[in-house]
Amino acid sequence: MAWKDINPFLSRFKHLEPPDKAVKDVCVRIVKQTLDIHLKHEEIRVEKYSIRLFTSPVVKNEIFLHRSQILLDINKTLAGKHIQDIV
């Protein structure tokens, strides 16, 4: 069986999305690198195409000021899931 014959069977796995834990890990790491702010996994909820933060207003405001850079870095790191907003 040649590799090109197996390609249609594997194509269904191209659109798999990473689990929420992986998205949270990436979010925590990128916020730490960008802003030197440590978020806990419990302070983050991943919804369909957005990340919701449950932390202090001061931390939220700092993250919102750098939202575009954080989203860009998150989407570069995560191949299968496209995060559109931080709420």
Image (tube, rainbow, N blue to C red):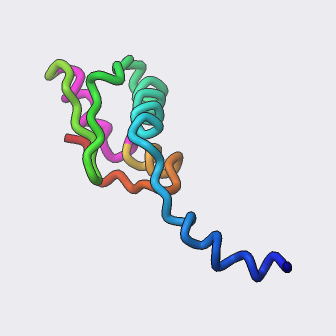
Give me the residue at 64% from left, 74% from top. 9
Which is nearer the eye, 2 or 63? 2
On the rendered image, what quadrant is the C terminus found in? top left
Task: Tell me if residue 82 comes above or below residue 37 in the rendering.
Answer: below
Q: Is residue 1 magenta?
A: no
Q: Position of residue 48 (x, y in %)?
A: 27, 52
Residue found at the very far right of the displayed protein: 1
Query: Image height check: is 8 above or below 81?
Result: below
Q: Position of residue 82 (x, y in %)?
A: 39, 56
What kind of secondary structure does the magenta stretch mostly adopt? helix
Using the rendered view, name the quadrant where residue 37 is placed.
top left
**Residue 85 seen in the current view:** no
* Residue found farthest to the left: 57
Q: Is residue 62 left or right of residue 27?
A: left
Residue 67 in which image quadrant: top left
Provide residue 14's location: percent of width, then percent of height: 56, 66
Q: Decide if residue 20 is in sight here.
A: yes
Image point 39% across, 43% down: which residue?
69
- 53, 22: nearer the viewer: 22
Vertical placement of residue 84 versus 52, above or below: below
Instruction: Tell me what residue is drawn at x 22 percent, y 37 percent.
Output: 52
Q: Left or right? Give the position of 49 relative to 2.
A: left
Residue displayed at 85% across by 79% down: 1
The residue nearer to you, when weighing 22 against 1, is: 1
Which stretch did the figure color magenta?
58-70
